[in-house]
Amino acid sequence: MRIEKPKESRPVSRFLLVVLLVIVILALYGYYQGKLVQPALPFQVQNFIGKVQIYSEVEKAWRQANRGQKVEPHETISTGPGSEIDLFSPNQILRVRIKENSLVELAGTKFLASQPLYRLNLMKGQLLGSTAQELEGGQVEVSVPHLTVETSNGSFLADAGRDNQNGWIGILRGHARVKSILPWKSTVIRELQKVGMEKGLVVTGPVPVSRTDWDRMKESYELIQKSALVEAMQMDLSKEAGNLFDYVFDHGTFYTSEFGYCIRDFVKDPVTDKVYLRTEYDVFPTGSYVGVYFKTRDLDVSKFQALKIDVRRTPDAGYPQSAKIELKSKSGIVRTFAIKMFRPKWETVQFPLRFRESTMIHEFTLVFFNNRVGEYKKGTVEFRNFTLVPKDTPQTTDRAVQEV
């Protein structure tokens, strides 16, 4: 009588069984908890030019793009020569522009995702994206062949590259995490940096963007738009940023044409309940300057002995070595000051106003120059408590800023 011994299980088979079991458990957990398997979110068409078509996976057919229509996950957008399309998220915080001769798929649900995603798979061409503020409770994920970028706040450009072998992703503002699969690599890139692939095999970077790269990426700034309602809210918030704004009737940003960019946002700190001005500057091109302006009415600076402002640099962002403040009358600049040494914590700086005769100020500006900001051509600084100090007020020991 022949008795066969039970055959031992192969280690590989056991490993595969364990992996399969783990996947099933995670999938079930994600399904019931709603935390590991998150749905991809739709976009809406803002506008488009030229021939733009959208392929429906459900209907198995192409349709012409229409303004205001939704583009759902698993649908594909195709742009022809000289064509492009702008999309925005339902909350209008995220905007995306797909350039000509591009093919983009809105990817579907992602396994092991901790939060909802706006997922875009760039199969051919270029796309730009930008967020107006932090994507709370969400994230945007853009893939080019062999690379994926994830961010919740910033402006970026994704290029699929020639023959899908030399794609790259660049960050203009904010920061992002770029991942590659073969070889596996995860890299954090910050403003004015890019990561690319060579022949689909070698990850390059992060490296600084070139002037040519910047010229291509700057278009993402156009996607940062503020509605009339948001601008009205900004005016209301600014009234809480100091008594200077008792005289301000308008404010905004300026920059040299085709060179540089500036973003200003008044924000209320949820902890201190104080309103501060966050200013992002980009003076990457040589010779550029940008800034924030405040139009004033009935402001006679001869009634005040000083202007005091709290300043600080923003953590994890570039900052300037120097910024300029200008006081302007109708005839031109009447007083200029320089702020230096932006520190991580709030610090009060004081600008002496030594005007003996009545002097009406019609504009107050914060200016950043390419040749004066130092190492960081792109950065963020914050200001609060814009205070005009009346004459006969006791002097303080705040850091004084000299006139230039």
Image (cartoon, rainbow, N blue to C red):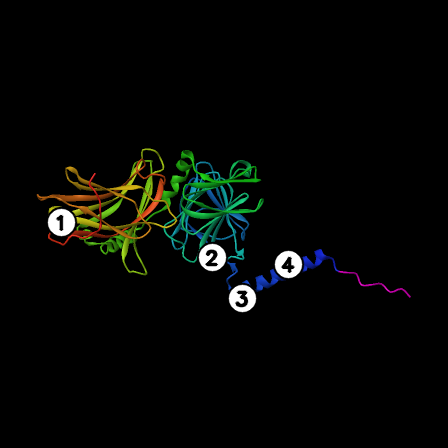
Task: Return the residue at label 2.
Answer: 116
User: In the displayed image of the protein, which residue is found farthest to the right?
Assistant: 1
Going by the numbered disc 4, the residue's amino acid type is Val
Q: Earlier in the sequence, mark 4 or mark 1?
A: 4
Q: Where does residue 258 sit, x and y in percent of width and height?
A: 33, 35
Q: Earlier in the sequence, mark 4 or mark 2?
A: 4
Give the structural element (helix, strand or loop) at label 3. Answer: helix
Dot 4, crowdedness within 10 Å: few (<14), some or many (≥20)?
A: few
Q: Can you say which quadrant of the picture contains the N terminus? A: bottom right
Name the mark nearer the viewer: 4 or 2.
4
Name the mark nearer the viewer: 1 or 3.
1
Q: Which mark is residue 19?
A: 4
Dot 1, crowdedness within 10 Å: few (<14), some or many (≥20)?
A: some
Q: Where does residue 351 sit, x and y in percent of width and height?
A: 19, 46
Name the mark nearer the viewer: 1 or 2.
1
Q: Which mark is residue 304?
A: 1
Mark 4 to mark 2 CA distance (whole Å): 25 Å
Dot 2, crowdedness within 10 Å: few (<14), some or many (≥20)?
A: some
Q: Nearer the viewer, residue 25 or 31?
A: 25
Q: Which residues are magenta?
A: 1-8
- The reply to whether callout 1 and callout 2 are in contact (CB within 8 Å) is no
